[in-house]
Image (cartoon, rainbow, N blue to C red):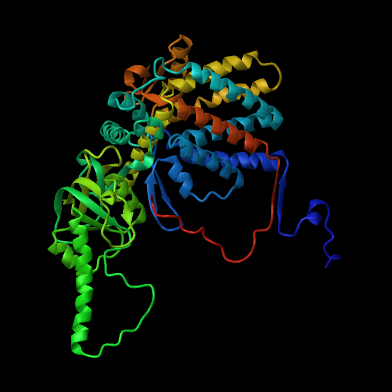
Amino acid sequence: MGLQMQSHGIQSMLKEGHKHISGLDEAVLKNIDACKALSIITGTSLGPNGMNKMVINHLDKLFVTNDAATIVNELEVQHPAAKILVLASKAQQEEIGDGANLTISFAGELLQNAEELIRMGLHPSEIISGYTKAINKTVEILEELVENGSETMDVRNKDQVLTRIRAAVASKQFGQEDILCSLVADACVQVCPKNPANFNVDNVRVAKLLGGGLHNSTVVRGMVLKSDAVGSLKQIEKAKVAVFAGGVDSSATETKGTVLIHSAEQLENYSKTEEAKIEELIKSVADSGAKVIVSGAAVGEMALHFCERYKLMVLKISSKFELRRFCRTTGAVAMLKLSQPNPDDLGYVDSISVEEIGGVRVIIVKNEEGGNSVSTVVLRGSTDSILDDLERAVDDGVNTYKAMCRDSRIVPGAAATEIELAKRVKEFSYKETGLDQYAVAKFAESFEMVPKTLAENAGLNAMEIISSLYAEHASGNSKVGIDLKEGVCKDVSTLCVWDLYITKFFALKYAADAACTVLRVDQIIMAKPAGGPKRDQPAGMDED
């Protein structure tokens, strides 16, 4: 065996079947190509006029969306360098919940410019040092662009919230942002705790119901459950609630035993005692003052009969997560098995009613007085894909609200910030000596990608727009951006388009880091893939 394989160099060191790619042309430029391909896909979806992508994943589920985070999650990106960009966008999605598209598109643009520099003969390490200088400078400039007086804000003031989340929602659902934003703002303000920094995104739920249109959407203080009440009672006001996680039924014992029955009377008595036992349990619940029983599992026939007799409303919530949220909404404590509840364990609701919305029966649990635990945005739309997209827009809005609770500073939106950054970083590059000044200049040029893409997606002439933006900014109007509706350059403070400083900060930082990481690679060594059938990843938890 050893004699036949007379190979040299790296081949003789590694197992057969491996791939080894090295050198500038092979490794670095191939990596850049893969990343460019990814950023071209997401680039056309950037901004309010972004196009939608139709992605069908390996489970045959269809996504129609322009939300970059969803697109890159569902595309199974195989190329190792492009995966780095995907990881950067996921980090952005985890950190802020919005701006994933900017991260990928900007990183792709940086790499494309790096490719030109490499072809001019710069070494990747010089490009990296230039990019690092440039991103540090960018962060400094970004601080100066923050709108005065935006450091402090009242997170319960709807108008202040609206100015900040409008841009995030408009980039997903252009033209419907006003309706959506006021829904999101209402829902977020309702559940905002005393200390806004502890705002929990999970407390704003989304219920998607087919039919109607966006203008039929509402915000419910409380929960909306997609199921019907089990018993015949369909509505109840101002009631106490008992929650049983283990189901409402006669409990089977842990140990097995045999009962010998000698006569018919004994058999009758045996079944009677079972009935009496359940009746006693249900009666004890009714006596504790509870009017509603919520079960986490099946409700037995006999138990249901006695619940009806004692005028108890019965709900069944099979999802564990929903049950926990229900407990949060009502302030109840879930008990494991059917027994008499303590008064402390009972929750309280203002009203529970079963309503029919668009042919679907839903239980609406309202808790107006009970404080700010959970609120639900009920979205209506004509198709499932529209509803999914609306939900993503709402999620972006809620995530932006959370980010704004941490840091409420805002910078001009609509590409005004980017052009100003491009102008200032370009000026900074003239002061640099050494080869990395070219890299700094290219970094500045990369910012032009944002207004260019926004203009192209809106069908405007990108060159004209960018040059007029530069002209405006050169004369000192640093807040001039693109008005996409009219296709002209305007002052964004009149358009009321603001982006959160923190979103921009992390998106640009992650993009620069990802681009530098890709540029640092000069060799790719791939082992032979292990044989055997492809293992699918284990299915995740449910949507929550």
Count of labels shown?
0
Residue 50 x, y percent position in the rendering: 39, 36
Q: Looking at this view, name the residue that lies furthest to the right.
A: 3
Q: State which quarter of the image contains the N terminus.
A: bottom right
Q: Is residue 213 left or right of residue 522?
A: left
User: Does 309 appear above or below 25?
Assistant: below
Residue 38 x, y percent position in the rendering: 52, 42
The answer to which of 459 and 383 lies nearer the viewer is 383
Q: Is residue 212 left or right of residue 247?
A: left
Quarter-of-image position of residue 288: bottom left
The residue positioned 20% from the left and 73% from the top of the image is 275
The answer to which of 113 and 340 lies nearer the viewer is 340
The answer to which of 308 and 32 lies nearer the viewer is 308
User: Does 198 appear above or below 333?
Assistant: above
The residue positioned 19% from the left and 77% from the top of the image is 272
Q: Looking at this view, name the residue that lies furthest to the top.
A: 475
The residue positioned 46% from the left and 28% from the top of the image is 502
Question: Do we see residue 229 in this rendering?
Answer: no
Residue 472 x, y percent position in the rendering: 44, 13
Residue 421 x, y percent position in the rendering: 51, 20
Q: Looking at this view, name the residue that lies furthest to the bottom.
A: 262
Q: Is residue 468 left or right of residue 297?
A: right
Question: Do we see residue 223 in this rendering?
Answer: yes
The residue positioned 48% from the left and 49% from the top of the image is 75
